[in-house]
Image (cartoon, grey):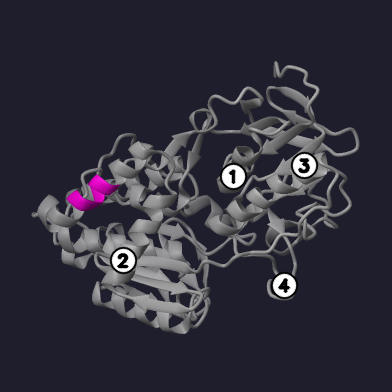
Amino acid sequence: MNIPKSSFPRIVIIGGGFGGLALAKKLCKKEFQVVLLDKHNYHTFQPLLYQVSTGGLEPDSIAYPIRKVLKGYPNFFFRLANVESVDAKVKTVATNIGEIKYDYLVLAMGSETNFFGNKEMAKNSMVMKTIPQSLNLRSLILENFEEALLTDDLHERDALMNFVIVGGGPTGVELAGALAEIKKGILPKDYPDLDTRRAQINLVQGSDRILPGMSPKASKKAEDFLEKLGVQIWKDTRVTGYDGKTARTESDLSFDTATLVWAAGVMGVAIKGLNAKDLMVYGNRLEVNEFNQVNNCEDVYAIGDVACMQLEKYPRGHPMMAQPAIQQGRNLGENFVRILEKKPMKPFVYNDKGSMATVGRNKAVVDLPNFKFQGVFAWFVWMFVHLFFLIGFRNRMVVFVNWVYNYIRFDREARLIIRPFKKE
C-alpha cells in the first residue's frame, strides 16, 4: 500500500461514512498515523439518495471526495480498496491491494440492505443504499414510462406505472412522497400522450403505522400527507416475494408491478475474520462495550451502523442513523487521545437530537426531544438541517439552488437516463 513507517501509532479505519470521517477528522492533527480504507473515493450523504433516484438532484451534489475532506494532513493516508478480511491475532487487514498492519483498527463500514434471507427479493427488487443503486432506480423509473408509451397492453402499461415501496421508514416515506409529486406535477407535462393518472404509488408497511421510529403523532401526520398526495398505504401487510412482475403478500393481496423498491431493513456489513456468531448481535452488528471496543477483540473498535452497544435504553443498539455514527466517531477520537495520554477512556453517551422526515413540498414531520411539529415549518427545518450536514460549500449551494428552482418551477431537472438499466 506504500504507507510510510511512522513512530506514531497507526489507526486503520475501514469505511468513509459519517462515523469514519468524523473519527478521521478528530485524529488528523494528533500524534497518530491515520489510514482510511474505502471501496469508493467519496463520501455519500445517504439521507438524500432518494432525491437522486427521483431526479431532484445530481449525484455529485451529495458526494464529496474523501481526499479533499482531509487534505493537508501529513499523517493521513487514504487508499481505495476492498477490504477482504481481518486477522485480529496478528493485527492485519487484508485487501485487494495488499495487507496493512495496524495498532488500532476501527470498523465503520456502515450498513447494507437486509432482505431477511429472501433470495427472490434480493434478486428482483431495487434498493437505494449507494449512488450507483440510486442511478439505477432513476433510470428504471424513466425507462418504465418510456416503455408504457409503446405498449398497447393496458395491463402491462399499468404494471409499468405501478410502484411498490416496501418499508414505511423515513426512506420509504420520502421516496413515496417524491414519486407522488412527480406523478402530480411532472408526468402530465413530460408524457401528455400517456394517461399518467393511472400511475400508482403503493407504500407497504409490515407494522400498524409508518415511521415507527417516530412519535405516533408524526406517523399519523405523515400518513395524512401521503394520502393527500395520492399514495396508497398498506399497513400490517408483509411482502413475501417478488418475481419481477408480481409482488406477493401474506394475504391474498398482490401487486402487478415492474418496479418494487425494498426499503424494509438494513443490517451491519460483516467482515471476514470478525463475523463469528459470538461477536454478532441484532441486525448483523458487532457487539461493543461503552467505549466502542469489539468484545473479545483487543484493539478493535466499531462505530456507527456496524456497532451494537446494548444499553437499557437501547437494548438493540443505537438507531442506525447518521447522528449516532458521528457522535461515536468523535467520542472514539477523544478516547484515542486519552489512550495516548494514559488517561481513562470516556464512555459513549448518545445525545438524541431527534428525527425527521419530509413527505413532499411544504410537508415534513420533526420530532425533537422536547418539541414535535409538522407541516411547512418542519419542512424548512428539515431542509436547513440537511444543508448544514452536507460536506462542502459547493454541495450546499448546488443543493440549495436546486431546491429553490424545483420549488419555484415545480420541476426536477435531473430526470435523465444517463446509463440505461435493465433487470437481469
Q: Position of residue 32 (x, y in %)?
A: 73, 31
Write down the region rendered in magenta: 400-405
In the image, taking residue 102 as reference, residue 28 lies left or right, namely: left
Q: Earlier in the sequence, mark 4 or mark 3?
A: 3
Which residue is label 1 attached to?
A: 22
Residue 146 position, x and y percent, is: 22, 47
Q: Nearer the viewer, mark 2 or mark 4?
A: 2
Quarter of the image for residue 284 reads bottom right
Residue 165's quadrant in the figure?
bottom left
Name the mark nearer the viewer: 4 or 3: 4
Q: CA distance from mark 4 to mark 3?
A: 26 Å
Q: Which of pointers 3 and 1 indicates the residue nearer the eye?
A: 1
- Determine the CA span between mark 2 and mark 4: 31 Å
Few, some or many C-alpha atoms within 10 Å of disc 3 (few <14, some 14-19, many ≥20)? few
Mark 2 and mark 4 in contact? Answer it, CB < 8 Å: no
- Give the residue number, with chain letter if any, for mark 3: 272
How far across and how far down the image is residue 142, in percent? 27, 48
Give the crowd class for mark 4: few <14, some 14-19, many >=20 residues within 10 Å. few
Q: Amino acid at mark 4?
A: Pro
Mark 2 or mark 4: whose residue is earlier in sequence: 4
Could you tell me what secondary structure mostly forms the magenta stretch? helix
Circle 4 residue: 315
Dots 3, 1 in contact, CB < 8 A: no
Residue marked by disc 2: 379
